[in-house]
Image (tube, rainbow, N blue to C red):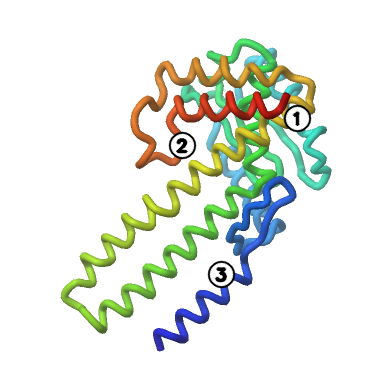
Amino acid sequence: MKKIIFICCLGLFFYACSSTDYTNRTRLMLLDEKEEKALGEQSAKEILKQSKLSTNKSQTEMVERVGWRIANVSKREDFNWEFYLIEEEQKNAFCLPGGKVFVYTGLMNIIENDDELAVVMSHEVAHALLRHGGERMSMQTLTQLGGNILGVITGTQIPGYSSLINRAYNLGSSVGVILPFSRAHELEADKLGILLVQKAGYNPQAALSFWKKMSEDGNKGSDFFSTHPSDSKRIEAIQNILKESH
Protein backbone atom coordinates (compact mmCIF):
# COMPACT_ATOMS: atom_id res chain seq x y z
CA MET A 1 0.00 0.00 0.00
CA LYS A 2 2.78 2.44 0.97
CA LYS A 3 4.68 1.58 -2.21
CA ILE A 4 1.60 2.28 -4.34
CA ILE A 5 1.07 5.66 -2.66
CA PHE A 6 4.73 6.55 -3.14
CA ILE A 7 4.70 5.61 -6.83
CA CYS A 8 1.52 7.64 -7.43
CA CYS A 9 2.99 10.73 -5.76
CA LEU A 10 6.27 10.34 -7.63
CA GLY A 11 4.41 10.01 -10.91
CA LEU A 12 2.33 13.10 -10.14
CA PHE A 13 5.48 15.06 -9.30
CA PHE A 14 7.31 14.30 -12.55
CA TYR A 15 4.16 14.72 -14.64
CA ALA A 16 3.62 18.22 -13.26
CA CYS A 17 7.20 19.50 -13.49
CA SER A 18 7.81 22.27 -15.99
CA SER A 19 9.88 25.39 -16.67
CA THR A 20 9.08 28.92 -17.86
CA ASP A 21 10.25 31.06 -20.77
CA TYR A 22 12.02 33.29 -18.24
CA THR A 23 13.96 30.81 -16.09
CA ASN A 24 15.53 27.41 -16.61
CA ARG A 25 14.43 26.29 -13.15
CA THR A 26 12.25 23.18 -13.07
CA ARG A 27 9.14 23.72 -10.97
CA LEU A 28 6.03 21.89 -9.88
CA MET A 29 2.83 23.06 -11.60
CA LEU A 30 -0.49 21.28 -10.97
CA LEU A 31 -2.61 24.09 -12.48
CA ASP A 32 -2.67 25.04 -16.13
CA GLU A 33 -2.47 28.73 -17.02
CA LYS A 34 -6.12 28.89 -18.05
CA GLU A 35 -7.15 27.82 -14.53
CA GLU A 36 -4.81 30.40 -13.01
CA LYS A 37 -6.29 33.21 -15.11
CA ALA A 38 -9.82 32.18 -14.11
CA LEU A 39 -8.82 32.32 -10.44
CA GLY A 40 -7.27 35.73 -11.04
CA GLU A 41 -10.45 37.07 -12.64
CA GLN A 42 -12.58 35.73 -9.79
CA SER A 43 -10.25 37.14 -7.12
CA ALA A 44 -10.18 40.56 -8.83
CA LYS A 45 -13.97 40.77 -8.75
CA GLU A 46 -14.01 39.96 -5.03
CA ILE A 47 -11.30 42.52 -4.27
CA LEU A 48 -13.12 45.25 -6.18
CA LYS A 49 -16.36 44.46 -4.31
CA GLN A 50 -14.65 44.79 -0.93
CA SER A 51 -12.23 47.64 -1.65
CA LYS A 52 -12.51 51.39 -2.19
CA LEU A 53 -10.85 52.79 -5.29
CA SER A 54 -8.76 55.91 -4.77
CA THR A 55 -10.25 59.23 -5.87
CA ASN A 56 -6.78 60.73 -6.32
CA LYS A 57 -6.83 61.39 -10.05
CA SER A 58 -3.12 62.11 -10.54
CA GLN A 59 -2.01 58.99 -8.66
CA THR A 60 -4.58 56.81 -10.45
CA GLU A 61 -3.37 58.12 -13.81
CA MET A 62 0.21 57.46 -12.73
CA VAL A 63 -0.58 53.83 -11.89
CA GLU A 64 -2.33 53.32 -15.23
CA ARG A 65 0.39 55.09 -17.21
CA VAL A 66 3.23 53.11 -15.69
CA GLY A 67 1.23 49.89 -15.71
CA TRP A 68 0.52 50.03 -19.44
CA ARG A 69 4.14 50.75 -20.33
CA ILE A 70 5.17 47.66 -18.40
CA ALA A 71 2.35 45.56 -19.84
CA ASN A 72 3.32 46.53 -23.37
CA VAL A 73 6.89 45.22 -22.96
CA SER A 74 5.74 42.02 -21.23
CA LYS A 75 4.49 40.72 -24.59
CA ARG A 76 1.51 39.00 -22.97
CA GLU A 77 -1.34 40.12 -25.20
CA ASP A 78 -3.39 37.22 -23.83
CA PHE A 79 -3.48 38.90 -20.39
CA ASN A 80 -6.52 41.08 -19.66
CA TRP A 81 -4.51 43.94 -18.15
CA GLU A 82 -6.19 46.24 -15.64
CA PHE A 83 -4.62 48.61 -13.11
CA TYR A 84 -6.24 49.81 -9.89
CA LEU A 85 -5.27 52.14 -7.05
CA ILE A 86 -6.89 50.97 -3.81
CA GLU A 87 -7.50 53.25 -0.82
CA GLU A 88 -5.48 51.36 1.78
CA GLU A 89 -2.77 52.53 4.20
CA GLN A 90 -0.45 49.54 3.93
CA LYS A 91 2.58 49.75 1.63
CA ASN A 92 1.78 46.98 -0.80
CA ALA A 93 0.96 46.02 -4.39
CA PHE A 94 0.21 42.76 -6.18
CA CYS A 95 -0.64 41.31 -9.58
CA LEU A 96 -3.15 38.49 -9.99
CA PRO A 97 -2.75 35.80 -12.66
CA GLY A 98 -3.97 37.19 -15.96
CA GLY A 99 -2.85 40.77 -15.43
CA LYS A 100 -4.99 42.43 -12.72
CA VAL A 101 -2.62 44.79 -10.88
CA PHE A 102 -3.51 46.47 -7.57
CA VAL A 103 -1.50 49.21 -5.88
CA TYR A 104 -2.30 50.56 -2.40
CA THR A 105 -2.30 54.28 -1.67
CA GLY A 106 -0.03 53.68 1.33
CA LEU A 107 2.70 52.71 -1.08
CA MET A 108 2.18 55.85 -3.16
CA ASN A 109 3.11 57.92 -0.10
CA ILE A 110 6.75 56.86 -0.48
CA ILE A 111 6.84 56.70 -4.30
CA GLU A 112 8.65 59.76 -5.65
CA ASN A 113 8.43 59.26 -9.40
CA ASP A 114 7.40 56.96 -12.26
CA ASP A 115 10.72 55.10 -12.07
CA GLU A 116 10.11 53.91 -8.50
CA LEU A 117 6.52 52.96 -9.25
CA ALA A 118 7.75 51.04 -12.29
CA VAL A 119 10.08 49.05 -10.03
CA VAL A 120 7.17 48.00 -7.80
CA MET A 121 4.70 47.24 -10.59
CA SER A 122 7.27 45.41 -12.71
CA HIS A 123 8.12 43.22 -9.74
CA GLU A 124 4.46 42.31 -9.22
CA VAL A 125 3.88 41.74 -12.95
CA ALA A 126 6.94 39.48 -12.96
CA HIS A 127 5.30 37.26 -10.33
CA ALA A 128 2.37 36.74 -12.71
CA LEU A 129 4.59 36.14 -15.74
CA LEU A 130 6.63 33.60 -13.80
CA ARG A 131 3.42 31.92 -12.56
CA HIS A 132 4.59 32.03 -8.97
CA GLY A 133 1.01 31.92 -7.64
CA GLY A 134 0.30 28.65 -9.42
CA GLU A 135 3.59 27.21 -8.26
CA ARG A 136 2.90 28.15 -4.64
CA MET A 137 -0.55 26.53 -4.80
CA SER A 138 0.98 23.41 -6.36
CA MET A 139 3.66 23.15 -3.68
CA GLN A 140 1.11 23.60 -0.90
CA THR A 141 -1.17 20.97 -2.46
CA LEU A 142 1.65 18.45 -2.69
CA THR A 143 2.81 19.27 0.84
CA GLN A 144 -0.72 18.74 2.17
CA LEU A 145 -0.95 15.45 0.29
CA GLY A 146 2.35 14.36 1.82
CA GLY A 147 1.06 15.24 5.29
CA ASN A 148 -2.13 13.24 4.74
CA ILE A 149 -0.17 10.22 3.57
CA LEU A 150 2.21 10.52 6.52
CA GLY A 151 -0.77 10.69 8.88
CA VAL A 152 -2.19 7.46 7.47
CA ILE A 153 1.14 5.65 7.72
CA THR A 154 2.07 6.84 11.22
CA GLY A 155 -1.47 6.33 12.47
CA THR A 156 -1.30 2.64 11.60
CA GLN A 157 2.38 1.95 12.31
CA ILE A 158 3.22 4.16 15.35
CA PRO A 159 -0.07 5.70 16.50
CA GLY A 160 1.33 6.98 19.79
CA TYR A 161 3.71 9.36 17.99
CA SER A 162 1.61 10.34 14.97
CA SER A 163 0.60 13.77 16.36
CA LEU A 164 4.20 14.71 17.20
CA ILE A 165 5.48 13.52 13.81
CA ASN A 166 2.77 15.45 11.95
CA ARG A 167 3.60 18.67 13.79
CA ALA A 168 7.28 18.23 12.99
CA TYR A 169 6.41 17.54 9.34
CA ASN A 170 4.27 20.68 9.07
CA LEU A 171 7.02 22.88 10.55
CA GLY A 172 9.73 21.21 8.46
CA SER A 173 7.82 21.51 5.19
CA SER A 174 7.02 25.17 5.87
CA VAL A 175 10.56 26.23 6.79
CA GLY A 176 12.30 23.84 4.42
CA VAL A 177 10.11 24.08 1.32
CA ILE A 178 7.30 26.66 1.22
CA LEU A 179 9.13 29.65 2.74
CA PRO A 180 12.40 29.22 0.81
CA PHE A 181 10.37 28.87 -2.37
CA SER A 182 8.71 32.19 -1.55
CA ARG A 183 12.06 33.90 -1.01
CA ALA A 184 13.35 32.45 -4.29
CA HIS A 185 10.20 33.76 -5.99
CA GLU A 186 10.83 37.27 -4.66
CA LEU A 187 14.38 37.36 -6.01
CA GLU A 188 13.28 35.91 -9.36
CA ALA A 189 10.62 38.62 -9.60
CA ASP A 190 13.22 41.28 -8.75
CA LYS A 191 15.44 40.08 -11.60
CA LEU A 192 12.69 39.89 -14.22
CA GLY A 193 11.12 43.07 -12.88
CA ILE A 194 14.32 45.06 -13.43
CA LEU A 195 14.50 43.71 -16.98
CA LEU A 196 10.92 44.92 -17.58
CA VAL A 197 11.80 48.32 -16.07
CA GLN A 198 14.67 48.66 -18.55
CA LYS A 199 12.58 47.54 -21.52
CA ALA A 200 9.84 50.04 -20.61
CA GLY A 201 12.40 52.88 -20.61
CA TYR A 202 12.50 53.52 -16.85
CA ASN A 203 15.59 53.90 -14.67
CA PRO A 204 16.41 50.53 -13.00
CA GLN A 205 18.58 52.30 -10.39
CA ALA A 206 15.30 53.40 -8.81
CA ALA A 207 15.09 49.86 -7.38
CA LEU A 208 17.84 50.75 -4.92
CA SER A 209 16.32 54.03 -3.79
CA PHE A 210 12.91 52.41 -3.35
CA TRP A 211 14.09 49.40 -1.34
CA LYS A 212 16.36 51.52 0.83
CA LYS A 213 13.29 53.55 1.79
CA MET A 214 11.32 50.38 2.46
CA SER A 215 14.14 49.05 4.64
CA GLU A 216 13.79 51.98 7.03
CA ASP A 217 10.73 50.31 8.57
CA GLY A 218 11.01 46.91 6.93
CA ASN A 219 12.45 43.50 7.69
CA LYS A 220 15.88 44.05 9.26
CA GLY A 221 16.13 40.71 11.04
CA SER A 222 16.51 37.11 10.05
CA ASP A 223 14.68 35.89 6.95
CA PHE A 224 14.52 32.28 8.23
CA PHE A 225 10.80 32.45 9.05
CA SER A 226 9.91 34.96 6.35
CA THR A 227 8.36 34.58 2.91
CA HIS A 228 10.44 37.57 1.77
CA PRO A 229 14.22 37.99 1.87
CA SER A 230 15.51 40.50 4.41
CA ASP A 231 15.91 44.01 3.02
CA SER A 232 19.71 43.88 3.24
CA LYS A 233 19.82 40.65 1.22
CA ARG A 234 17.34 42.01 -1.29
CA ILE A 235 19.29 45.23 -1.81
CA GLU A 236 22.53 43.27 -2.20
CA ALA A 237 20.87 40.97 -4.77
CA ILE A 238 19.46 43.96 -6.68
CA GLN A 239 22.90 45.58 -6.77
CA ASN A 240 24.26 42.39 -8.34
CA ILE A 241 21.39 42.26 -10.86
CA LEU A 242 22.05 45.87 -11.86
CA LYS A 243 25.75 45.14 -12.37
CA GLU A 244 24.92 42.12 -14.55
CA SER A 245 22.44 44.12 -16.63
CA HIS A 246 25.05 46.63 -17.80
Residue 107 position, x and y percent, is: 54, 21
Separation of residues labelled 2 and 3 (CA atoms) = 26 Å
Residues 47 and 188: in front is 188
Question: Which of the labelled discs sits on residue 189, or is there none?
Answer: none
Residue 189 position, x and y percent, is: 61, 37
Residue 159 lies, with reference to residue 138, above or below; the image says: below
> Can you identify the residue that label 3 sits on?
13
Q: Is residue 192 left or right of residue 2?
A: right
Q: Residue at x 47, y 58 (%)?
A: 140
Q: Secondary structure at mark 2?
A: loop
Residue 97 position, x and y percent, is: 66, 46
> Can you identify the residue that label 2 sits on?
228
Residue 96 lies, with reference to residue 231, above or below; the image says: below
Which class describes the residues within 10 Å of circle 3: few (<14), some (14-19), or many (20+)? some
Separation of residues labelled 1 and 3 (CA atoms) = 34 Å
Residue type at mark 1: give it. Ile
Q: Secondary structure at mark 1?
A: helix
> Can you identify the residue that label 1 sits on?
70
Residue type at mark 2: give it. His
**Could you tell me which quadrant the N terminus lies in?**
bottom left
Separation of residues labelled 1 and 2 (CA atoms) = 23 Å
Q: Residue at x 23, y 72 (%)?
A: 162
- The reply to whether the C-beta atoms of the residues labelled 1 and 2 are less than 8 Å apart is no
**Who comes first in sequence, dot 2 or dot 3?**
3
